[in-house]
Structures are given as structure tokens and as C-alpha cells.
Image: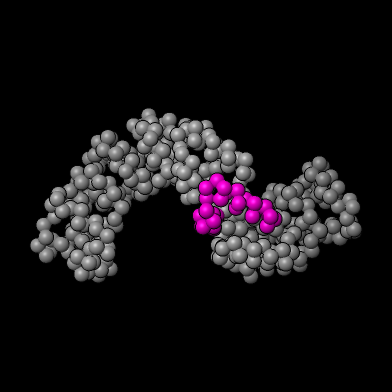
Amino acid sequence: MNVDELLISLGYTSEESANIINYYSNAKLKESTLIENINNNFNILHKLGYKKEEIILIGNKFPQIFSFTSNGIKQKINYLISLGYSEKDIVRMIKKGPQILGLSFKNLEQKIRYLMNLGYSEKDIIRMTKNECSLYFYSEENINKKIEELINLGYNVKDIIKTTSKNPTLLTINMDNINRKIDLLMEIGYTKEQIIKITKHCPSIYNYKVDKIKEKIDKLEKLGYDRKSIIKMTTSLPSLFSYSLDNIENKIYSIMNLDYTKEEVIYMTEKLPSLFGLSMENIKEKIDFYDYIGFHEMVAINPLFLIQSINLSYARYNYLTSRGNKITVDNFKRLFDSNKDFEKLYGITRNDLIEMYNYEEYKEKKNDRTL
């Protein structure tokens, strides 16, 4: 069996086989060695968990893989594990960018040192590259240029390092696409400063289609939000763009079922967009407690009260009332003082409060009583 017959028997098309064979036409590699490597490497990739279709795709993207010995691939995988990647990470990385197997140990070490000199930690680099292994293929010159261009747009170095350490997307998007997306978002009504703020937290916005963003804004307007509020909300909570309209509507109507009007819920979510990210169980538990102590309407007036954990609200309420401090509309905000101010005023820390008045114990007893 020759190379062409072997590749076709493994699942490659005639055209794909021809492309791989053409890649090796000038290589000083014996056909018998190539056949052995193809068989061995197919087996290695299969043992790593790749499906047949995925192995075919890897071979098409990176035919050079069949020039490697099985020992060479095993050594590279072991080296990547020694850097801090899990075998699961490596499987995903090879699938996305099989070229990583072609990088020498020296090249990998140099890129890691370079990224550390920019300000990334080793932990950052592992997290970044397991999601965007293409960073290993970018030249230092290209990365330096991208950082310089981002600084010229309005980002600072600290922002870039912090943002890309969690989501390296910003370093991989073409600058023409970034500039074009900024212009289109400004046409919708965002300022450049707002766009920079949004993409610091969610750089993947640059990959979103503007038509989809416009469609989401139009639908939010139909729900009752005005354009100015939507821009403010999405600047504060960029992930709102990724929420489906069904989820947004369901959250609005679920909160309405807790005895609020639609206008009140619109106002609450305008002031606190992160409500869309909280579970209804979390929201209901807090509102039920404020209902119990007689302050249902205060949540609609200042939804920011919903940020504080129910554990702390419960502990503070019980601490104050047990000492004769009646909670009224006028002093209700006292429950939400900063930890520093509360401790300074009453001489008790947050942890001591929660330990003294344990909400979880109260909830268990409450549940037992209702059984």
C-alpha cells in the first residue's frame, strides 16, 4: 500500500491525499517512513481521544504532523504538561492549532519569557494560550504592534494585560475589524470611551455582528427601554449582548410575579443591569426577606440593595433590631452601609455578624417549620 492508498483508506479524499503528498514532494523522507509515521500518529491521536474526522482535519490543517515520529509527539505533549497544561488542554489546543506540535521547546520557552516580560504571569500565559494557542504562532513584533495600536485607540498597557490575561481575543482580532466595529458602534450611539470600557470586560464584542447588536437593541426598546438606557446598561453589563431575548423577557416577567409592575422592573434593571445575571432563586430569596421585614417597595426604589448578600442583610437586621434600633424607611439604608462604616459605627465585623446571626441556620429552621 502506498501513501495515497493509505490516506484514502484512513478517510482522506483524493484531493486531500494529493495535497498532503504534494507537501512532502520535496521532503527527504522515505515513503516507508512516511507510511509508518501516518499509521503511528493516527493511533496516538486516536488514543488522545480524537475522532477520526478530527484527525483528518488536523492532518489537512497541518500535514507536517506526519513528518514527526511518535516519540517526538509524545515528548512535546509531556513538555506541554510540564509547563502546566492538562492533557485535556493539550487535546483542545492541538485541535485548534496543531501547528503547536511543530514549535520547538526553545520557541515555546522564548515566547513564554517574552509574555512574562510584558507583564503576564505564568498562570496567565497558560490560561491565555490554552484558549488561544495561536498566540504561540504570533511574532513578538506583531504582538508589540498590536499593543501599540490598542494604546493609540485608548487602552492603556495595564488594561490590555488585565483584559487579555482573562480573554486573549483582543490580541488576535485584526485592527481593521476593530476600527470598523468601533465606527459602527458609534453610529448606534456609543461613545468611543464607552466602547473601550465595554471591550475591556468583553473583547469578544468585536466579533459580534453589528446587525445582531442592532437587533438586540431594537427588541429591548420594544420591551420598554429607551436607547440611552440600553447603551448605559450594556456599557455596565456587556454580557447583556449575549443573553437571549427570551431569557431577558423571562427575567422581567419573573420579577413582575414578585409583585412589581413592568415599569418598576424596567427601572430596577436599568439601575442594576446585573439583575439579568442573577438567578431568580437569588433574587426571590432577597425580596422575600425584604417583604418579611416590611420593605418591599424599597427594592423598587433602590434596586442596588439587591447586590448585598442575603446573609449580611439578615445578620445586620437582626443585630440592629436586637439592640432596639427600629428599622424604618428613613434609616433602611443603614442595612447597606459599607463594611468599614458599619464596623466603625457598631464595632462588629462582617464575619462576626454573619456568625452571630447565621442566615443558613435560620433558613433550615424555617423550612423545617413549613414541612
Name the outermost residue toward the front: 152
Predominant SS of the magenta segment: helix
Of residues 189 and 355, the one nearer the viewer is 189
Tell me if residue 230 comes above or below residue 4 in the rendering: above
Stretch in magenta: 138-166
* Residue 341 point in image, percent of width and height: 24, 63
Q: Is residue 170 visible from the viewing direction of this image?
A: no
Report the quarter where the C terminus lies. Answer: bottom left
* Colour scheme of the rendered structure: one colour
Position of 198 with respect to 321 (left or right) is right
Position of 217 with respect to 275 (left or right) is right
Q: Residue at x 69, y 65 (%)?
A: 110
Q: Residue at x 68, y 57 (%)?
A: 140
* Residue 240 point in image, percent of width and height: 43, 42
Q: Is residue 325 magenta?
A: no
Q: Residue at x 29, y 42 (%)?
A: 268
Of residues 12 and 298, the one nearer the viewer is 298
The number of numbered discs placed on residues in the rendered structure image is: 0
Q: Is residue 121 visible from the viewing direction of this image?
A: yes
Of residues 14 and 258, the one nearer the viewer is 258
